[in-house]
Image (cartoon, rainbow, N blue to C red):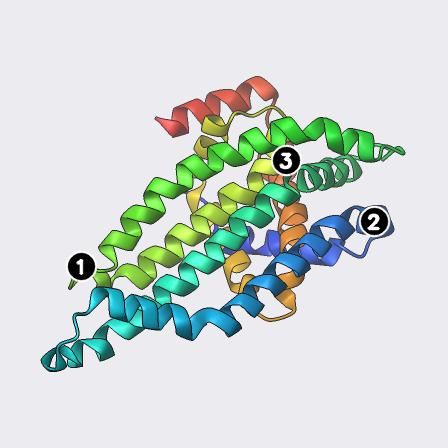
Amino acid sequence: MRGNPVRGAGYLGRGLAMLPQPGIRSFVLVPLLINILLFGGAIWLLMSQFGNWIDYLMQAWLPDWQWLDFLRYILWPLFALLVLVVVYYSFSIVANFIAAPFNGFLAEKVERQLRGDPLGNEGWAEVIKMVPRALHRELAKLLYYLPRVLLLLVLSFIPVINLAMPVVWFLFGAWMMAIQYCDYPMDNNKVSFANMKGLLKSHRFTAVGFGSLVQFGMLIPLLNLIIMPAAVVGATIYWVEEYAGDHGDERLVSVGRIANR
């Protein structure tokens, strides 16, 4: 595998630094508000229902036999992890679907600024035009994600194998974060979903470095509220410097096809 994880992580830092720029910050507002509302709702839901869900899972999975009480100490952390994963990824999926057109719009404006093109005065009409394409692309990501996360959930309950699952979950999450956010600028440039995955695979360490820092940022209170727009901006810088800046469109498609085999 090729790439540089440190360089990949650096793109998120550059995305964060670019958010306050006058030409960018006005396009950050809607993704930021979506993130605040949905993840605020997720935190409220966990705080109010977490104990009830754990109790329900314990009662559903464990028979009421006293001699099996020791299993509660083993299964409780697994059930807690399951609840956290399901709530976190469920709200992430909803947030990404709602924010997709705005994130695509933000990625376009960032790319135009990086290339020195005038931003223009396009507004809601352009965002509305992006909705069908953006939702179709989010569906493609969801169909890619769901079977893999279900497989990982099953493996997490298998003894011995589950010892390695925290690392596997982390790497899978990093890869999905790279796919999620790098897709916006690539979709704007008409790179297909299959070719987008291939391009990221061709420098997988860079992609995983970027996605890893996005994951860490999402775990830090307050910082996680601005991670979505920062990741979109960082992914757009990543696209321009790693791919679009050095390759023509035909070369990009060719590289993607070769890497995706």
Q: Work out whether 207 lies above or below 221.
A: above
Q: Which sits in the foreground, 178 or 89?
A: 89
Identified at 38% across, 54% down, the residue is 171
Write down the residue under mark 1.
158
Residue 26's tag is 2
Q: Which sits in the foreground, 162 or 206?
A: 162
In whole angstroms, how far apart are the C-alphas of marks 3 and 1?
Answer: 39 Å
> Does the residue at mark 3 contact the one at mark 1 (Cβ under 8 Å)?
no
Q: Give percent across and percent down for residue 149.
A: 35, 48
Specify the quadrant that holds the N terminus: top left
Q: Give percent across and percent down for residue 188.
A: 65, 29
Q: Quadrant of the rendered structure where residue 159 is? A: bottom left
Write down the residue under mark 3.
185
Q: Nearer the viewer, mark 3 or mark 1?
A: 1
Query: Badge 1 local density, few (<14 within 10 Å), some, or many (20+)?
Result: few
Amino acid bearing label 1: Ile
In whole angstroms, how far apart are the C-alphas of marks 3 and 2?
Answer: 18 Å
Q: Is 118 placed left or right of 65 in the picture?
A: right
Q: Work out whether 163 lies above or below 64.
A: above
SS for callout 3: helix
Visible residue check, residue 210 = no
Of the two numbered discs 1 and 2 on the same chain, state the one appearing first in sequence.
2
Identified at 77% across, 38% down, the residue is 109
Query: Badge 3 local density, few (<14 within 10 Å), some, or many (20+)?
Result: many
SS for callout 2: helix
In whole angstroms, how far apart are the C-alphas of marks 1 and 2?
Answer: 48 Å
